[in-house]
């Protein structure tokens, strides 16, 4: 039954990068349906075997973070928005519990990572399809159906080092290596400046591990990159090139698409509610008087700081510091570098997006928290965590 549960976990991770493409009337995204089914299967499996994974510091810190966010409901600026976010957080808590049960196992972890890349490939296909059909949004930007171009761009960028890692670890790596150029092309089509910069950081891991390939493979890939780049460059829309070329200008002289004005209002709110925040999920309502519109913070760290105050931000900081501690304990320098690059990519990206309630954000953090990727266990059954047995 564990194997069946693992396959369902992989399906759940697969739909995360495509959840907005497929929606179900009256239910929402497809990930909600798969997630609900997964929860009941895992619950049944846990009851049958009579064991649960022993929790660690990451689980505890994440739980405390969720609890504090729930408490902010009582003084929230918008209790309806806070109630919705609390429900989302409970779902995230369950998701983390389930994922970490399997991420602690080497083979299962590889399957989960592969599922994420395959899901990202579907979104890439949707982006390219929109490009071919000339179905652009937001001024000639191309995205998968239902996605914001900046959100999708970061989802695709984060999958690049995963795809390369899998290509080094698996014999049948064609799909992962093909994904990398297609993923970069799709990121350019989204014209997301943040995602483009993040994707360039992802190249560092590829450069660092390029020596692991045979000389023949290195030559073939090098020639393929030259050939494909020269061809693909002519396919890139001029509007995408123009937007991406404004990165340095926006950083030095621009307002980052009015984000700086939103952040000024956010800091004003923070000075008033610095200790306990305006309430989880209530940023939209709280910023209305200052900014004149209901908008998100467009910065995960500012969003947490304003909504949950210094206390919530401190707890979140402990989560991140624990992840840094886990990564620095990795004995293999190569894998330590991979996770450091992965963390830099994620946190640079969420500096311009509100992602503290997104599944993909906590999925990535769960991967970081679940141990050294090169320590592969031989089967799907055992877990590196000591199990807690209870009487049925």
Image (spheres, rainbow, N blue to C red):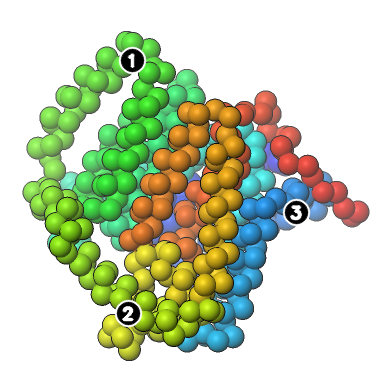
Give the alpha-carbon distance from disc 3 to disc 1, as whole Å: 46 Å
Q: Is residue 177 visible?
A: no
Residue 282 position (above or below residue 384): below
What crowding class fits label 2: few (fewer than 14 Cα within 10 Å), some (14-19), or many (20 or more)?
A: some
Q: Is residue 249 visible?
A: yes
| Residue of label 3 | 44
At numbered mark 2, what does the secondary structure look like: helix, strand or loop? helix
Q: Name the residue located 42 percent from the left edge and 64 percent from the top edge.
A: 300
Residue drawn at point x = 53 percent, y = 46 percent: 324
Residue 265's label in the rendered image is 2
Q: Nearer the viewer, mark 3 or mark 1?
A: 1
On the image, numbered disc 1 is attached to which residue?
A: 217
Q: Position of residue 150 (x, y in %)?
A: 30, 57
Label at residue 251 = none
62 vs 239, nearest the viewer: 62
Mark positioned earlier in the residue sequence (3 or 1): 3
> With 46 as the anchor, is 92 left or right in this view?
left
Classify the position of the N terminus by image quarter.
top right
Residue nearer the viewer, 20 or 187: 187
Q: Position of residue 135 (x, y in %)?
A: 18, 56
> Dot 3 lies on which element?
helix
Q: Quadrant of residue 59?
A: bottom right
Residue 29 image point, x, y percent: 46, 62
Quadrant of residue 381 within the rendered picture = top right
Q: Quadrant of residue 255?
A: bottom left
């Amino acid at each position: 039954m564990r194997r069946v549960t693992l396959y369902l976990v992989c399906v759940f991770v697969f739909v995360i990068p495509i959840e907005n493409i497929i929606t179900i009337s009256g239910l929402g995204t497809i990930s909600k349906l798969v997630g609900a089914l997964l929860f009941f299967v895992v619950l049944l499996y846990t009851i049958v075997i009579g064991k649960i994974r022993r929790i660690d510091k990451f689980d505890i810190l994440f739980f405390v973070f969720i609890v504090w966010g729930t408490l902010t409901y009582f003084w929230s600026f918008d209790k309806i928005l806070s109630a919705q976010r609390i429900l989302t957080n409970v779902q995230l808590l369950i998701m983390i519990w389930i994922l970490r049960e399997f991420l602690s196992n080497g083979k299962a972890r590889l399957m989960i990572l592969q599922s994420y890349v395959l899901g990202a490939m579907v979104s890439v296909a949707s982006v390219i399809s929109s490009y071919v059909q000339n179905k652009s949004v937001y001024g000639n930007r191309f995205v998968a159906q239902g996605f914001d171009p900046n959100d999708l761009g970061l989802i695709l960028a984060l999958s690049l080092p995963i795809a390369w890692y899998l290509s080094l670890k698996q014999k049948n790596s064609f799909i992962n290596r093909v994904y990398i150029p297609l993923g970069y092309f799709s990121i350019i089509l989204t014209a997301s400046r943040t995602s483009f910069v993040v994707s360039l950081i992802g190249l560092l891991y590829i450069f660092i591990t390029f020596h692991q390939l045979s000389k023949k493979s290195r030559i073939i890939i090098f020639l393929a990159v030259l050939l494909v780049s020269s061809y693909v460059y002519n396919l890139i829309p001029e509007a995408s090139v123009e937007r991406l070329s404004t990165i340095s200008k926006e950083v030095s002289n621009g307002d980052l698409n009015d984000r700086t004005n939103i952040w000024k209002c956010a800091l004003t709110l923070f000075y008033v509610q610095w200790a306990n925040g305006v309430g989880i999920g209530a940023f939209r309502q709280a910023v209305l008087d200052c900014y004149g519109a209901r908008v998100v913070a467009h910065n995960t760290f500012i969003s947490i700081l304003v909504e949950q105050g210094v206390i919530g931000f401190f707890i979140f900081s402990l989560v991140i510091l624990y992840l840094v501690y886990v990564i620095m304990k990795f004995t293999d320098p190569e894998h330590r570098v991979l996770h450091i690059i992965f963390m830099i990519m994620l946190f640079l990206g969420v500096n311009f997006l509100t992602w503290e309630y997104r599944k993909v954000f906590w999925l990535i953090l769960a991967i970081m928290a679940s141990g050294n990727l090169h320590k592969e266990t031989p089967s799907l059954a055992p877990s590196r965590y000591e199990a807690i047995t209870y009487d049925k």
